[in-house]
């Protein structure tokens, strides 16, 4: 499997979105979950340094 810096758009599998955008969506979701679970949820980000997250 070839590594890509893009992920499939959930609305249209023929288009791609950047990993940066995908991470923004994850971050927004985890913000909500952190508000719900407070100290019971620990978030650890592990993003390969070669991935362009800009």
Image (tube, helix red, strand yellow):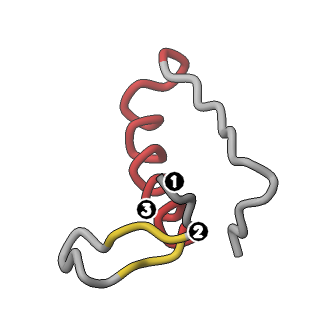
- Toward the viewer: 38 or 10? 10
The residue under the point 65% across, 31% down is: 44
Q: Report the number of discs.
A: 3
- Tell me the element at label 3: helix
Asked if the residues shown at circle 3 and circle 1 are in contact, with their CB atoms under 8 angstroms apart, the answer is: yes
Mark 2 or 3, nearer chain start? 2
Q: Position of residue 25 (x, y in %)?
A: 43, 62
- Tell me the element at label 2: loop
Residue underneath mark 3: 25
The residue under the point 52% across, 75% down is: 18
Mark 2 or 1, nearer chain start? 2
Q: Position of residue 4 (x, y in %)?
A: 55, 66
Asked if the residues shown at circle 2 and circle 1 are in contact, with their CB atoms under 8 angstroms apart, the answer is: no
- Could you give the CA–CA distance between mark 3 and mark 1, rounded to whole angstroms? 5 Å
Residue underneath mark 1: 27
Is residue 25 depicted above or below 30 in this figure? below
Question: Residue 41, which numbered label?
Answer: none
Furthest toward the front, the residue is 1
Residue underneath mark 2: 5
Q: Is residue 18 left or right of residue 16?
A: right
- Which quadrant of the structure image shows residue 19? bottom right
Q: Nearer the viewer, mark 2 or mark 3?
A: 2
Question: How many neighbours does mark 2 have within 10 angstroms: few (below 14), some (14-19), or many (20 or more)?
Answer: few
Question: How many neighbours does mark 3 have within 10 angstroms: few (below 14), some (14-19), or many (20 or more)?
Answer: few
Q: Is residue 25 left or right of residue 48?
A: left
């Amino acid at each position: 499997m070839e590594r890509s810096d893009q992920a499939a758009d959930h609305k249209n599998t023929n288009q791609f979105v950047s990993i940066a955008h995908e991470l923004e969506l994850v971050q927004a979701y985890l913000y909500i979950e952190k508000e719900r679970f407070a100290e019971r949820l620990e978030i650890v980000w592990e993003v390969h340094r070669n991935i362009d997250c800009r």
